[in-house]
Image (cartoon, grey):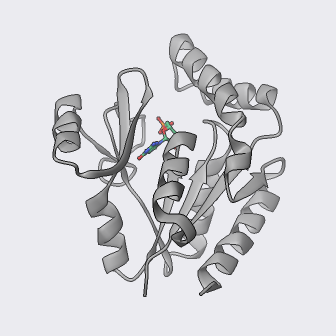
Amino acid sequence: MEGKLIIFSAPSGAGKTTIVRHLLYRHSDKISFSISASTRLPREGEVDKKDYYFISKEEFLHRIAKKEFIEFEEVYSGTFYGTLRSEVERIWALGKHVIFDIDVEGGLHLKRKFGDRALAIFVQPPSLDVLVQRLRGRGTDSEEKLGERIAKAEKELGYADRFDVILKNDDLNLACSEAEQLLLAFLARE
Ligand code: 5GP
């Protein structure tokens, strides 16, 4: 079996993490989550090696130098996120396909690299206003970090049409079932 990539990208707060979790819950026999490396601190409830490989900036830079990343980015100033080649290979070796929750630039990067082997899905929130409300409601970020996330989200909304599919997330249940149909159709493809 040739392992495939299912990429979910969106501005922060668009609901992609919830959708990805739903797919993992329903199809854990077929897909597994690509655990990214990140230099940010864990949020409450997050677990190392499950949500992210939480590593120091020194270690991250060292791994860049050793070419261990398929893609990486300084998603927010001073904070790096990246996909390790070893992570994707680990999942393929289990006979599963890899599902990603990564930012818009990272998603497009993987799509360029893997072509038809990858399905790149852009999760579109109802509007920028709704997105801002969701980010505020989360209450996990400082005002400064929030401002940075909002500015980035605004820019990212303009990249939607570069993806294979735009998945509207006005209604989360509907978006989850549409995502499921997209996933199954893509995996069934030769
Ligand atoms: P958060 O800090 O909210 O967990 O993630 C911030 C952003 O970084 C989200 O859009 C998330 O999808 C993205 N992200 C997580 N892992 C990666 C990765 O490996 N590469 C890239 N490019 N972005 C990532």
Residue appearing at x 49%, y 73% in the figure: 4
Q: Is residue 164 left or right of residue 79?
A: right
Count the labels in the image.
0
Quadrant assignment for the N terminus:
bottom left
Q: Nearer the viewer, residue 154 or 31?
A: 154
Quadrant assignment for the C terminus:
bottom right
Quarter of the figure with residue 78: top left
Residue 60 in the image: above or below residue 3: above
Residue appearing at x 31%, y 69% in the figure: 89
Q: Is residue 178 left or right of residue 91?
A: right
Q: Is residue 127 left or right of residue 8?
A: right
Is residue 143 visible in the rendered image? The answer is: yes
Q: Nearer the viewer, residue 189 or 25?
A: 189
Residue 140 in the image: above or below residue 117: above
Q: Is residue 156 left or right of residue 38?
A: right
Q: Position of residue 152 (x, y in %)?
A: 60, 26
Q: Position of residue 170 (x, y in %)?
A: 84, 47
Residue appearing at x 52%, y 11% in the figure: 144
Q: Position of residue 101 (x, y in %)?
A: 52, 51
Is residue 137 visible in the rendered image? The answer is: no
Residue appearing at x 31%, y 33% in the figure: 39
Q: Nearer the viewer, residue 165 or 30?
A: 165
